[in-house]
Image (cartoon, helix red, strand yellow):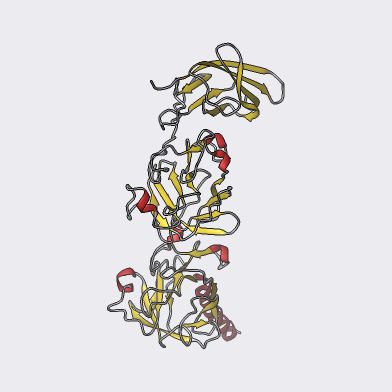
Amino acid sequence: MKKKLFLFSILFIVNSNFAQYGNSLTITEVMFRPLEINGQYIEFYNTSVTDTVDLTGFKFKYYTAANNNIISLSRGIKLAPGKYAVILQGNYNYETGLYKTLIPDDAVVLKLSSNNFGSSGMAKTLDRDINLINASGETIDAYIYTADNEDGISDEKVVLNKNNDKSNWGNSIKINGTPGNSNSLSFIPKYSYSNLAINEIMYEPNTGNSEYIELINTTKDSIQIGGMKIITGSDTKVKLSNSSLKLAPGEYFILAADSSIFNNYHWLKTETNIRITGTLKLLNDGTTIVLKDYWGITIDSVSYSPGWHNKNIISTKNLSLERLNPYFDSNDKANWSTSVSIYGGTPGKQNSVFTQNQFHQSNVSISPNPFSPDNDGFEDFTVINFNLSRALSQVRIKVFDSQGRLVRTLVNYKPSASHNSIIFDGLDGNGRPLRIGIYILLIESVEENSGNVEVMKAPVVIARKL
């Protein structure tokens, strides 16, 4: 009886160790489209916090190929807890290759006993499954990589101690990958709506000029735009950058259809934050532009229309649509107007129609006041800020001239919160410029539930240059 109990104890310890090793090792990166010759690699990680794993006798299996033995190349054959191991091709020149400088000293470096993963290397354009097999022949982790990468971009696991579902993997944003290091995707945050704003759109350029979309970082921190996408219409998707690229606060980024953009805006240099895409498909009669972060979260969207142009400008060809203020609603047509720059646009620079919002702590404030809507790019618009005493109301704003005649209804029973900002372009109800003089704004709000009415008045002055 004692002998049987002793034998059972040994078997339990052995089986526990194998189970522990199987659960603690996970594939974390696959480089199947390397820039280096014979540069394919597989990375895996020991998720245990206490146990070192002896990798002697471990094998790797690619798709339908036979198992490949894994042997030590550098730093032994045992993988400490919380450390990475990298399997290189058997025919990779490690001593002169790039990976020797990329793989850190605390990572275990392994290689295949044969030249390639499988018979001739991992497929670059087809999804394939890969398997890590222990010394007992058991598959302890498996992953099917997604072959949608560009050269030099690996597949990376996001959360290392979670499963290998496709939602937990993505394309690296670091050229040549991160062999033996923390994955680049582990450090990409999820952004909020309008952190990065669509700020200018050139959809109808002259021959010899380029379509473009300009973005601006509206936050006080740098934004990682690597892997972010612009989607125009229903099917055109363009990455802002395939690799890591941080945009500083207030900094611009430009997507351009072709390199002719450099010939039309002399301040742009090749080192500017700009990407030439080959296509944007910005339709002359309008379309929708959606900006998504790496994780697929929409952080801005615009459905522009040629009707957003200044009605007093006869021809808007080769004139961009510029956003008056990137902090105001992206789909409010009053927040967009025609560029008045002599170049027809301002990619990489402050918009020619930019309107500063100088909010004051009072019921109504108007800035600038006076303003001069003469399309010269200086104080062409004014911002009306007003505070309501109630959380949710319906608001109507009317503009009267000095004789008390109604000349424009800016807002007609629009749902509004406590703090509001409205842009006024100095035009009457028919889209014609108002004459110089003093005008009166009448702001009426009706509380959503009670029907209580709140009324505010404020003067606004329209001026012209002499």
Residue 279 % position (x, y): 49, 59
Residue 101 % position (x, y): 30, 70
Residue 57 % position (x, y): 45, 85
Describe residue 452's horizontal placement relative to residue 205 as left or right.
right
- Residue 241 vs 439, above or below: the answer is below
Residue most extreme to the left: 96
Residue most extreme to the front: 314
Residue 127 % position (x, y): 55, 75
Describe residue 451's horizontal placement relative to residue 240 as left or right.
right
Residue most extreme to the top: 403
- Residue 422 vs 196, above or below: the answer is above
Classify residue 390 by image quadrant: top right
Q: Which residue sits at x=55%, y=37%? A: 329
Of the 4 image quadrants, the one containing the N terminus is: bottom right
Can residue 85 be seen here?
A: yes
Of the 4 image quadrants, the one containing the C terminus is: top left
Can residue 273 be seen here?
A: no
In this view of the protein, which residue sits in the foreground, 411 or 466? 466
In this view of the protein, which residue sits in the foreground, 353 or 173? 353
Describe residue 464's horizontal placement relative to residue 407 as left or right.
left
Describe residue 445's horizontal placement relative to residue 425 as left or right.
right
Q: Which residue sits at x=46%, y=46%? A: 318
In this view of the protein, which residue sits in the foreground, 196 or 94? 196
Q: Which residue sits at x=54%, y=40%? A: 330
In this view of the protein, which residue sits in the foreground, 320 or 276? 320
- Residue 107 vs 407, above or below: the answer is below
Tag count in the figure? 0
